[in-house]
Amino acid sequence: MSCSKRRNHFQSLMLLQWPLSYLAIFWILQPLFIYLLFTPLWPLPALYLVWLFLDRKTPEQGGRRSAWVRNWTVWTYIRDYFPITILKTEDLPPEHNYIMGVHPHGLLTFGAFCNFCTEVTGFARAFPGITPHLATLSWFFKIPIIREYLMAKGLCSVSQSSIDYLLSHGTGNLVGVVVGGVGEALQSVPNTTTLLLQNRKGFVRTALQHGAHLVPTFTFGETEVFDQVLFHKDSRMYKFQGYFRRVFGFYFCIFYGQGFRPGTTGVLPYCRPIVTVGECRPQPPGHLSSFSTSTSCLPTPSPWKKIAAEGEKLGVELECEPVRPRKGDRGGRKKKFSHSLLIFFLQLGSHCHCPELKSQARSWWTNTTPSTWTPCTNCLSSIRHSTAAQRPKSCFSSDFGDRVPHSARAHA
């Protein structure tokens, strides 16, 4: 057997170790861990359980990455198997934070894993000062030992609190969110790319709230490495997949690729190039990092009252979704800045000439109640008559339409 063939077989074995390592931890180390509780060595797992309780918030606070794990040689064999590369189109300044929309999910997300959970494709060299975090299902971090393995590679929880923490503690953080989620995995077949974007735009709202720049990325070839058996929506197997998804959080997919011998079918993915490319969408200059306030307890008359009233009026004109009070709000209804007022502040910086706007707006977000300034007539008129073409395009992808998406409404 030639050296090249031996190397290809070795690459195949190294590729299989990645998914098999999770199965080994779950089906071998986990039972062993439980078994030790009933042996004289019970203090070891008992201490780990205590530490696990004390460390339970770490996945929600950026995780605990290991440069040693991210630089394991085994990841280079996975990279060279396809191969996997990342194509840099522009710099990402470390003075900002970023939310990266990862498309598509694929079946095993090889591209996102190698590019953002390891250093084998040169991410740190290409984007110095940027720390990547790939977000995944939260319940993975509740499984002992597996949670440590995931965090060591730079993964974090996809929960809202986890993303908020990363975007509000320091700069240079890049949080990768697979927007389509596991739902796209069920649609992953070669020669077809299906993206699930409807009702999945919450990451845009989060970016606006924290002033983070959006980085949409697309991984070419991610859906080409496996064939999948698709079932009709009325079939029992499809219903079972839905039930499995509700219980475990991901779909039970039946897929296949190539075998160890040429021309055979097996569990190995096809050797097809995987390339990740992206483009940064910066926030507009007039961005403000908070969009809510309570007006129920402020004295009358107050500029907040007028601003909130104008916001509701503009919201009706712009066909924005009404803001409903949440449970637990005290002191009457809690009024929030809706889409209209968000557009109001984004627009004023570029379409109006109100010298006091910037300083006054900044003071509001530091809990300083304005006492003398109110929106001028030109400001309100400019917003009411603004067209879709005049609105800042750098905030929102063209896929989301001209109107501000409902998911971008502000939270208290």
Image: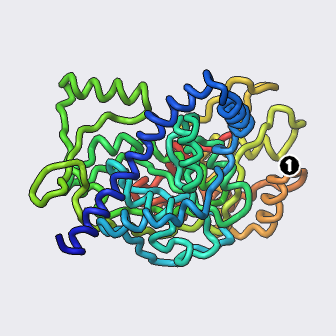
Q: Residue furthest front?
A: 40
Classify 10 Å Cα crowding around label 1: few (below 14), some (14-19), many (20 and above).
few
Residue drawn where x is 21% and y is 44% of the image: 228
- Mark 1 lies on a secondary structure that is loop
Residue drawn where x is 72% and y is 54% of the image: 168
Residue 243 appears anywhere in the view: yes
Residue 187, position in %: x, y? 27, 44
Task: Give the quarter of the figure containing the C terminus.
Answer: top right
Q: Quadrant of residue 278?
A: bottom left
Looking at the image, what colour scheme do you see?
rainbow
Residue 98 appears anywhere in the view: no
Amino acid tagged 1: Asn
Q: Is residue 331 above or below residue 222?
A: above
The residue pinned by badge 1 equals: 367
Nearest to the observer: residue 407 or residue 124: 124
Q: Is residue 193 left or right of residue 171?
A: left
Q: Is residue 364 left or right of residue 131?
A: right
Residue 63, position in %: x, y? 64, 50
Q: Is residue 95 above or below residue 322?
A: below
Q: Quadrant of residue 321?
A: top right
Residue drawn where x is 58% and y is 53% of the image: 152
Residue 310, position in %: x, y? 68, 45
Residue 217, position in %: x, y? 43, 63
Task: Give the quarter of the figure containing the N terminus.
Answer: bottom left
Q: Quadrant of residue 250?
A: top left
Q: Residue furthest left?
A: 263
